[in-house]
Image: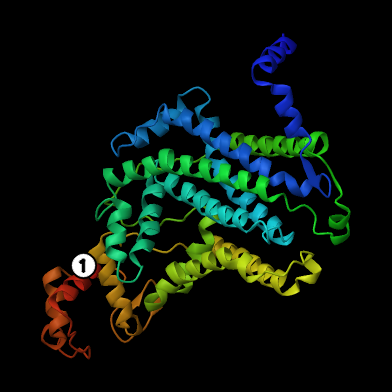
Amino acid sequence: MFARLIAWLDERIEIRKHWKAFAVRPVPGGASWFYVLGASLVFLFLLQMASGIFLSLYYVPTPDHAYASVKFIQNEAPFGNFIRGLHHWGASFMMVLVALHMLRVFTFGAYKKPREAVWLIGVFLVMLVGGFAFTGYLLPWDQKAYWATVVGTNVAGTVPVIGGALLKIVRGGAELSNLTLSRFFAIHTYILPWSLALLAFLHILVLELAGAGGTWNAAEQKQNFSEPLFPNQIFRDTIFTLIVFLALSAFAIFSPATLEPQADPTDSTYNPRPEWYFYFIFQMLRIFEGKYEAVGTVILPAVAVIALLLLPFFDTEPERAPRKRQIMMSIAGLAVVTVTVLTIMGARAPIINAPAVTSPSVLAGRILFNKNGCISCHSMHGKGGTIGPDLTHVGSKRDREWLMRHFKDPQAVSPGSIMPKITLPEKELNELADYMQSLK
């Protein structure tokens, strides 16, 4: 039956001819286990698409029904808990494998001429994978999803000058709402999958046109040593992909995706912690506090992305052997160690009580608080000066009117206070009061 099907297809679209052209494609330097990461990433993307389609059959992207629909998937839909686990852990596997794939390409020097375009597209693919992980975070609409997204979107508000406007664009308004959820769902299920599929196709197409990098061994390159893709490399790809799927299934079965209580926007006591692959950013938020916050949220990430994009134009030497690229390999090693250490520190760090910062006005007030060095006199969550009172929960103790009067004339409101008058425009005083009111 199968032979007849192949014969039928071959008569119409010459399937044997196309298979032969695919199978005899040369693998420079011969088959290697180092080359299995690309095929496994394609498999994971297809699995994420398939599991995501199943989830979307039951999911309702509204705050009133999102949580209930995810709970139904997890508890009642056929194989729902397993498929949701595959989708949940698939994001982690993709983050790991895409990082290893990029590291492998860097180590082999495969980003160099004539494969610069392949590398550039790959960098954008990495960012899209991160976008997938972030936008999918909110969809369960439980406490962790809601408040972690509040903190994550606050990062957009730290961008100088356009932060407030950017925050509104990301959220679809001042607060997380129905618009935020529907916007994230649309980006996660429509925009990002098609964008990633298109870029992945271009990535593979440009790689075919430029030629695979193969080994860094100069002697083998001169000998033009290679072997066909089939059977050795396809065998390795298949075995590794099977291992990935079995590991992913084990995680889905023995450590299923969690679902916390339904999101409560009024619960400002909840302390969020992101998924492990965002721990290094979480830790940078702790390191760069106050007026240096934008360094950790905007400047360093932007520098890292620009460095990756400029890498093939900066490192133009034809030599690809790692031992002869000691400076570049040392820089890469330092970057890997830094991210690893930040991730471990983020995993061990105590949770920060930060979710109260939600609106652009509150965020602007926090920036003013940091910019004017208020933390040098006042403490919050155990950090800061001791000259003035602790402001950790000041919003529960003082109303807005008292705060405004105290800003303008501290001695009149609190006799004996050594705090100077705050000479800011009325708009900024109101933003500062909004921030103080949020600290409950």
**In the rendered image of this protein, does residue 184 appear above or below residue 75?**
below
The image shows residue 253, relative to residue 34, as above or below, that is: above
The count of marks equals 1
How dense is the environment of label 1, judged by Cα within 10 Å: few (below 14), some, or many (20 and up)? many
The residue positioned 62% from the left and 51% from the top of the image is 98
162, 254: nearer the viewer: 162
Rendered view: 429 above or below 341? below
Which residue appears at 55% of the width and 44% of the height? 91
Q: Residue 347: give x, y in percent of width and height.
A: 55, 60
| Residue 180 in view of the camera | yes
Q: In which quarter of the image is residue 185?
A: top left
Image quadrant assignment for residue 157:
bottom left
Q: Who's the residue at 68% across and 39% down the image?
A: 244
Q: Residue 423 in the image: x percent, y percent?
A: 17, 85
Residue 406 lies, with reference to residue 170, above or below; the image says below
152 or 112: which is nearer to us? Answer: 112
Judge by depth and name the residue closer to the eye, 48 or 303: 303
Amino acid on which disc 1 is placed: Asp
Nearer the observer, 221 or 341: 221
Residue designated by label 1: 434
Q: Where is residue 32 in the image (x, y as percent from the top left)?
A: 81, 46
Q: What element carries label 1?
A: helix
> What percent of the width, then of the height, locates residue 435?
25, 68
User: In which quadrant is the C terminus drawn?
Assistant: bottom left
Q: In which quarter of the image is the N terminus?
A: top right
Asked if residue 251 can be seen in this view, the reply is: no
Q: Residue at x 47, y 44 (%)?
A: 195
437 displayed left or right of 314: left
